[in-house]
Image (cartoon, rainbow, N blue to C red):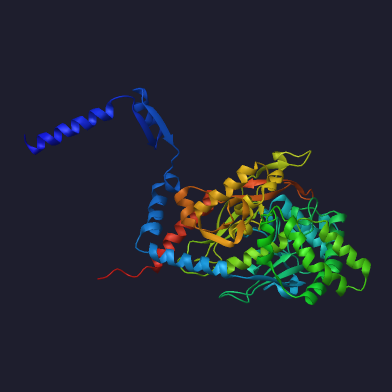
Amino acid sequence: MSTSTVSTNTLNASTSVLLDGRLEVVHAGIDAVAEAPRSTGATVTLVDFEPPSGGDPRRMTLLSEVLSGPMAPEIDAANARALARLLASRPHLVGIGIARDVIPGMAEDLFLHAGPPVTWERMCGPMRGAVIGGLLHEGRAKSVEEATTLAASGAVRFDPCHHHDAVGPMAGLVTPSMPVFIVEDRGGERAGTRTFCTLNEGLGKVLRYGAFSEEVLARLEFMRDTLAPVLSAALALRGPIDLKHLMAQALQMGDEGHNRNRAGTSLLFRELAPAIVRATEDRERAARVLEFVNGNDHFYLNLSMPMGKCMLKAAEGESLSSLVTVMARNGTDFGIQVASMPGRWFTGPALQVRGLYFPGFTEADANPDIGDSAITETAGFGGFAMGAAPAIVQFVGGSAEDALAATRAMRRITLGANSGFAIPALGFAGTPTGIDLRLVEERNLLPQINTGIAHRDPGVGQVGAGLVNPPWEAFHAALEALAEHVRAAAPPPRA
């Protein structure tokens, strides 16, 4: 018998064994293709599958270039360096100053805002409300009508907080006379870098949600004239506070650093309270400050944000890196930036938040996603650390299992983990850190953000909280730019 005859007989026998009995098929791809085996009585298991970059041929080609092209090893090496610098950063709270005196480029006619650039004409309701409140607070207008006219006239310039090493929650408004936290990097290659953020007002009807009532303005005056000077004197007496160390503790106490900051605020209170008492002669003045901080569980948010910004600035400027360094929203647009192209925005429309609403409000009342607070997720906590904060679901919706699943999912689009930010419920694994633009596109998986919800009209305030994702348009635009950037950096072909 010839060898070919033996091979044919063996193949026929194998085929017969394969087709004997009930056929079981595992199918990944277009669902319609699975109808043929199913029609023969086969058991078909469908696997959830989607081609990279949503199946768009052009984007898939670009993705292949940056994932497996000749420059891919250089991109991987750049990402490793950027991530290492991010993790080596040691942000410390070093002081409190007045915006005009400490924020780079701040001027008397300049208001800073959250998100990418936006004009008054395109500003959403809550951001317009914050600008109106800012003009009233600065004494540049005496009425809402006068403030509205002034803002529309061009008498005030607007610029993103991120352009000035600052961040701001929700509307993110920073006016010249506002007090700001000063955070300084005291570790790694970028030691000395400083970032800034206003002090947190609390929840409800507050300026950052677009409210500008007398109550809101009175609180801002208290924060400028009493809260900031007392905290500044206490901090000068106590000395710098290691925010990364404080955040590590807060994560193990049930915080995630974005929408749950009760532990972080409590830890900060413990650090500052003795110094507040010692540095303040007026006991009633000290008591008012202590009561304000103690009564505001979100007070630490305005430190977790500049801490995250400080960490990410350490990664900026790493040529070829695909690590995302900014995610920010202005209520109209959502913008991202990438380490290899610092300062360059890639934008898409701000989306509606899926969440829980306060009594009397519905999704119809909600403004689209707004605020710089997504810097927390960008730096590897916030929505990326929801597994550390199961109680957060009572505020943003979902279940404790959903919180754990969200953190696990974010591992698929990040370059590594921050071992300093350990999550007890996940075996003390570090939080997923370093969003890789390429992995977002390859896995068709957008970053998870948890956030507050502002009323769409000026002057109302917060109406809920929930979960949201960035728009795909921002990441698609960044992928195209990254591929172009990498091509321009590639060595010329050999002759």
From this view, report whether residue 118 is shown above or below residue 489: above
Direction from residue 290 to residue 106 in the image, left or right: left
Return the x and y of residue 18 as percentages of the image width and height.
Answer: 27, 30
Q: Name above or below for residue 237 compared with residue 50.
A: below
Q: Quadrant of residue 40?
A: top left
Residue 357 sits in which quadrant? top right
Q: Quadrant of the N terminus?
A: top left
Q: Identify which residue, 432 or 193, lies in the foreground.
A: 432
Residue 137 sits above or below residue 14 on the image: below
Q: Is residue 19 visible?
A: yes
Left or right of 495 on screen, residue 383: right
The quarter of the displayed image where residue 102 is located: bottom right
Residue 74: percent from the left, percent from the top? 40, 66
- Residue at 60 percent across and 76 percent down: it is 191
In the depicted view, which residue is nearer to us: 180 or 25?
A: 25
Q: Which residue is pictured at 62% across the width and 54% down the height?
A: 424
Residue, far left: 1
Residue 148 in view here: no
Left or right of residue 122: residue 137:
right
Instruction: Give the image location of residue 205, x and y in percent.
Output: 81, 51
Residue 234 is situated, as x and y percent measured from the top left of the image, at: 81, 73
Q: How many marks?
A: 0
Can you say which quadrant of the picture contains the C terminus? Answer: bottom left
**Image vertical order of residue 409 relative to residue 184, above or below:** above
